Amino acid sequence: MQAHTFFLYLLIILLSARLFAELAVRLKSPSVIGELFAGIVIGPSLFGWIEPVEALKLMAEIGIILLLFEVGLSTDIKRLIRSGRKSTIVAIVGFIAPLLFGFSIAFWLFELSLLVSLFIGGTLTATSIGITVRVLTDLKINNSHQGQIVLGAAVLDDILGVMLLALLYEFSIGGGVNWVNAAKVLVFVSAFFVLAPMLAKVMSMVIKRFHANSEIPGLIPTTIVSLVLFFAWLAHVVGAPELLGGFAAGLALSRRFFLPLGVTLRKDESFAKAIEQEMQPIISLFTPIFFVVVGLSINLRAIDWSSPQVWIFSFVLLAAAIVGKLIGSFFIRENLASKIMIGMSMVPRGEVGLIFAELGRFSGIFNNEIHAGMVIVIVLTTIIPPFTMKYFYKRYSHLLVEAK
Amino acid sequence: MQAHTFFLYLLIILLSARLFAELAVRLKSPSVIGELFAGIVIGPSLFGWIEPVEALKLMAEIGIILLLFEVGLSTDIKRLIRSGRKSTIVAIVGFIAPLLFGFSIAFWLFELSLLVSLFIGGTLTATSIGITVRVLTDLKINNSHQGQIVLGAAVLDDILGVMLLALLYEFSIGGGVNWVNAAKVLVFVSAFFVLAPMLAKVMSMVIKRFHANSEIPGLIPTTIVSLVLFFAWLAHVVGAPELLGGFAAGLALSRRFFLPLGVTLRKDESFAKAIEQEMQPIISLFTPIFFVVVGLSINLRAIDWSSPQVWIFSFVLLAAAIVGKLIGSFFIRENLASKIMIGMSMVPRGEVGLIFAELGRFSGIFNNEIHAGMVIVIVLTTIIPPFTMKYFYKRYSHLLVEAK
């Protein structure tokens, strides 16, 4: 690909993302909706101007990792741990229920094969942490008690989703599942989550020392981005989703990070501030690329809209996808409005769901109709909840509690 | 290419660039030398860890364009125009002399064919504006009178180099040269250089208006990067080197920009400051990628070091390359030390030279030995001058005049 064509692609992506985000905000919607819509407009669904070429996809990946880094940066690890029990319940119920509902509907109602039904269930499991946190941040409720539960649950859900994907993938190619491997991954991921923030913290202190001594400007952008990329890579190596590496790095560099066992670190507010200030423009540049590329990878034209099968299939599964996530929050002790707010926030599928659907089509497990149906479900779970989340969070804003 | 491998590549590039840049500065050399060296170390010349894959090359291209944007941002257009006559002389003599010397040596001394000799001469013509300005900035003399002459001459040289490349390319594939096309390109490029900054200025005022009204953060990074990409693309469309589009955009957004014909714009210092502040981390992130990728694309192992032919060929041409650029400054009225400083600053070849050599090899015009020899010449002209520039600029710092 020639550089000037790439420049043109990138500038169309950045400008359309901005334009539709501004429009979305003026229509009282979260800006992320505008960015997804921009991808649909400039992509194969409508104008077909931009193909999601490899370099764009890689920059989009950097975008989602940096977004999770930013989320980590503004997360208070104490609060996250405090909401841990509730998050775990919401995550596990919200993972099992859609899997079970999706599988049952596909297997018994539509009489599809075991493997196809398992893949359909799997596609419905993972909450899109990227979209969920963007909406929470857009609505400025990411630090509320409810927001923290959602954040913790979304992180867990992402891990569970990727593990299920690995299991189903093994199952689809080999016919069997290696439970020892699966358990190993779980141990690695857990260890990663405990150790990564501490390692990142130590590394950031090395960077801080260099920062005080370096004569060349631009230390923070290059080293902090390297740190984030390193943990994304490390997450992949231990079998966790890459974006969780970004989250772990962000947690460690947040102003509210603490080491366990009472080890105290000298806080340096000015360094933390410098990081936030210098990383902000980089994050703002890369993040929209991700959401536009998600929109680009949806092709609404590939769906046979005239087939009633597709519609029935999609809407039954959509109901399963929404109800499956909503009930997760009914297993925790909160008032009704909070339960609905939390449950609704867990509904958006997105990147992991799309990866499931893509793998299903790629490996021949999904035929075109099923694939189209699944894409419709993912698109609707991604597009509807921001509106309803916004409605509920505004309507019941008096019930939002600042997290302790 | 998988995302996690790309993350690893990128982080190795960023960290090695930083490490070797810090080392270079501690050894009293410009940091850009460290970045080039980092590319040589991690690339095929030594460890071979990193391949310059497409996505990296594209990010490197963004880096060089953003660097030229930054240069434009800190350029005072009045000063640039004031040094215009001297710059033009330095550029034209420093373009014709290496072309003539290189061609003559190849054609008469080494008895190579007409086309090969023309390509060898062409490879020696273009000053690497990227490396030159980085060294000037590293030494903090980019705003001196001498620095301004070099900057203007390097910009002109880049345009001349790319035009010659287009001519020779046509000549090599078609056997003839279309002078009408060549003249057309010259007109387009000149028009671009007069009109682009004005257009960019108008666009920046639109961005400024949005900036005052937008509720979503991150407007400056996305829109200013888009603006820079747009002018890089536009430069390509009219036949100019892309990086000059970045320079034009930077000029327009600089605090010292003025419109011709006495049209005055209301200055907004705070907006200009916000642009500088928010663009700085992005520029610092992308720029090292460019210089490391230049280092990556040099393969010192591909050179047959045992062949005396290669050495003689290279060193004769290296002398021609250095003398050819040095004499350009002897046609302007300056004291001797300034002449040497200016001439020496024009010596670094780099991206355009490498593109010439690559095209020569690719199209079968250069055999392996000639290609290797040309690469040696480019590498040495790139690596030696920063040291000598630094020496001369320090030794004769009392002769440096702040540009009026």
Image (tube, coloured by chain):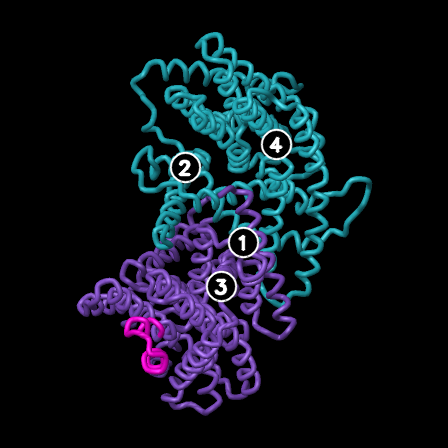
Chain colours: A purple, B cyan
Chain designation of label 1 = A
* Residue numbers of the magenta segment: A98-120
Crowd class of label 4 (few under 14; some 14 to 19; many from 20; radius 10 Å): many
Residue placed most toward the observer, B225 or A378? A378
**Residue type, mark 1 in image:** Ile
Q: Chain of mark 4?
A: B
Helix, strand or loop under label 2: helix
Q: Residues under labels 1 and 4: Cα distance?
A: 32 Å
Residue B326, position as x, y percentages in the image? 55, 19
Label 4 secondary element: helix
Marks 3 and 4 in Cβ contact (< 8 Å)? no
Residue linked to disc 4: B155
At mark 1, the secondary structure is loop
> Which residue is denoted by mark 3 in the rendering?
A302
| Subunit bearing disc 3 | A
Check disc 2 and report the residue beneath it. Answer: B34
Give the foreground label among 1 and 3: 3
Q: Nearer the viewer, residue A152 or B29?
A: A152
Residue A272: percent from left, percent from top: 45, 62
